[in-house]
Amino acid sequence: MSDRGRRLGLTVVLVACAVLSTGHAQLVPGTMDVHWNSGSEDCVNNPQPAIQVHRYNPQTFILRQNPCATYEAPFLYLLVGKNRALLIDTGAVADAKAMPLAEKVISLLPGGEPRLPLMVVHTHGHLDHRSGDEQFRSLPNVEVVAADLESVKSRLGIADWPDGIGQIDLGDRVIDVIPTPGHHRAHVAYYDRQTGLFFSGDFLLPGRLLIEDREAALASARRVAAFIAERPISHVLGAHVELSESGDVFWGSTWHPRERPLQLARKDLLALPEIVNGFNGFYSRRGIYVLMNQNRILLLLGVGALLLLGTVVWLIRALWRRLRRGVSHGV
């Protein structure tokens, strides 16, 4: 063998050893060079396209429902494998005329007959992530996995909830399913081994982190940090963007001017356990995150409203008694 041949062979061996030592092949790249539609202050006189599609790479699509169609403006993800495709979430709008989601998703699948089978899953069961399910249920070669905990555990292969990891094999593309309860009892995140994309749903996003169960959310944050410890992460992609570049929160708005980027980074996932651990269980703000327990806030507002109503009733009764005494004394 020539010196050149020996050097080439040594190089191949070293590269193979490096891949084996990390357990990960090179990630398939993609681009996040996209400007998301901002919606409008006046959606009636400034109609917007219902869905925006960004092609991250030829097998990965990011769909965003316009803020004018729904103030939730959720992001949905379509991943195409060799044997089937996966749609993560179906958004906040059920009406196919107002939001032709199924039509758009089917048009993005590779052409030819038979069409590539599609599996529809969810990050969790809140309505802004599953309202479009009915558009897919009657379609051929489409499976819609229900968002309840038992369906998630059985269909996504997570017998040991919440400590197990499920897998979805799309054909030369494996998606890991990581339990992340805390925002919702059946919340899961998805990790694409092919691209290194981590789809975090409402578990982590730029804006409000709505935490129903602090202890479960903390355990989930630690579970995810351990999961990604030796895995490459290209981007963390959540289900919403609720923050402007200056840090203002879009509270139920159809207009998202100067919206900050969707994507977060590996360091943001690794920092999450400390952030959740510091949550007071009610309301706090840490950088680009607004941590809230909506149930407790609503309860407090309800108690406050009752106290206010009680005070008003007491004042009215006190004034009425005073007026009656004045009348009885001839005042």
Image: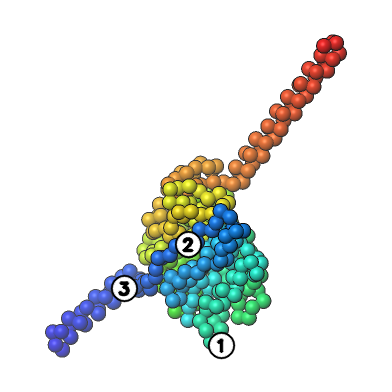
Q: CA distance from mark 3 to mark 1?
A: 37 Å
Per the rendering, the mark at residue 19 is: 3
| Residue projecting furthest to the front | 45
Q: Position of residue 76 (x, y in %)?
A: 53, 66
Query: Which residue is painted at 39% across and 64% down in the image?
Result: 233
Dot 1 crowding, Cα within 10 Å, few <14, some 14–19, many 20+: few
Q: Determine the secondary structure under disc 3.
A: helix
Front position among marks 2 and 3: 2
Q: Determine the secondary structure under disc 2.
A: loop
Of label 3 and label 1, which has the lower sequence position? 3
Of label 2 and label 1, which has the lower sequence position? 2
Q: Quadrant of residue 45?
A: bottom right
Residue ID for mark 1 = 113
Q: Position of residue 239 (x, y in %)?
A: 52, 60
Q: Which residue occupies the foreground of this view, 155 or 140?
A: 140
Q: Which residue occupies the foreground of this view, 127 or 329?
A: 329
Q: Position of residue 217 (x, y in %)?
A: 51, 52
Residue 177 visible, this angle: no
Q: Determine the secondary structure under disc 1.
A: loop
Query: Which residue is painted at 61% across and 67% down in the image?
Result: 99
Query: Where the C terminus falls, by quadrant?
Result: top right
Callout 2 amino acid? Trp
Q: CA distance from mark 2 to mark 3?
A: 36 Å
